[in-house]
Image: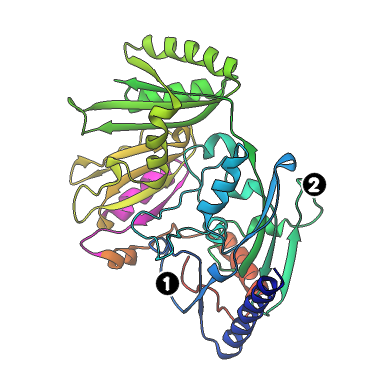
Amino acid sequence: MVAMQDTLQHTLQDFTRRILHASQTGQPLRLRGGGTKDFLGQALQGEVLDTRAYSGILSYEPSELVITVRAGTPLAEVEAALAEKGQSFAFEPPHFSAGRLDALGEGATIGGMVAAGLSGPSRASVGTVRDFVLGARVINGKGEHLTFGGQVMKNVAGYDVSRLLAGSWGQLGLITEVSLKVLPVAPGEATLVCAGVSQAQALKLINQWGGQPLPLNASAWVYDTTANPAQDFFFVRLRGAVAAVDAAVTKMSADVQALGAQVTRMNPQDVADDWHASGEQTLDFFKAPSEHACLWRLSVPQTAPVLDVRVNGEACAQYIEWHGAQRWLWAPASAASQVREAAVKAGGHATLFRTSSAHGDADKQVGVYTPLNDVQQRIQNELKKQFDPAGIFNPGRV
């Protein structure tokens, strides 16, 4: 145990030494865990600083619903520990580890999960990664090991810096430890599969249900071209008390049937793999329809109408999640202006999530992210300057 602690302390000292050297020389550092999200972002630059040497669960109190973990710990290891106690990360963070596991079988890390700030199918109902961060430790560009937040949820005077780290993509510093809120797995669950519900009908239904006391957890709409015959499918997952789930199934099934559509209640075990595949983007929809197609993520208000995005007169295939707030579509990089215009018109923004197989990173010349306005850019620049004066952490990633 003492030897392990000495090794971990040495690892932290090595991290600090490398950061200070990089700041003094201007040599960029690429902060990375498992590297499973390297595909996302504008550019990867700098010498890799691999966090996986700093690994392990520091503390886990199931009765307190909080876990504190070193940043290099595999996400799968933490999720397994939570599952043993009937708990989980309610926001269902994606791993994106398919085909990207290293020799040790490790993929995504806790630090990468927080830095990326990505959430799975249940995000619209339970919140995002940021909402579950209680505290964090981070080494800034001056080599200072700073502590923010704690291990309990409370009102805090001043800026909640620990949550600022969620979704920062390592731009502000090297996350070393993080404390996260966890939740018990819901006792009741059911998924309704609605066949023949159009996208417009699905959006209307989910917004109608969202205004009622129903245990909504996740939703997805897709025009399934692999079905025979091809048709619209609308999936809704319910989680909560068993009685509440059963009552909601009866009420919502009647609403769907009133549209003349078919509805089937599926057992959680039968659709668990499908919901997991939705979050990990391994469903058939996420297979590029052509070598020039890029995957775009449109973040819009849940109440946004159907987005009619066309390329050369042909409608782009879409997959709708988060009760209408997240819409995936396939379109070439050359259609960036049309995609972004549709998102902005709906009150949102668009992100180039995956490049095409034909052009790869060349597609990113159109810009991965929608540009920030002047005020947002100034705030981001000032934060970056405070945490990373020399600009060494993941330059050009966002």
Q: Secondary structure at mark 2?
A: loop
Q: Nearer the viewer, residue 353 or 336?
A: 353
Give percent across and percent down for residue 112. Answer: 53, 60
Q: Secondary structure at mark 1?
A: loop
Q: CA distance from mark 2 to mark 1?
A: 37 Å
Dot 2 amino acid type: Asn
Q: Which residue is mark 1?
A: 44
**Residue 305 seen in render:** no
Q: Which residue is mark 2?
A: 155
- Position of 140 with respect to 271 (left or right) is right
Pointers 2 and 1 in contact (C-beta within 8 Å): no
Among the 4 quarters of the image, the one containing residue 146: bottom right
Residue beneath the point at 47% across and 45% down = 348
- Position of 184 with respect to 123 (left or right) is right
Give percent across and percent down for residue 363. Answer: 29, 63
Highlighted range, magenta: 335-359
Is 121 above or below relative to 366? above
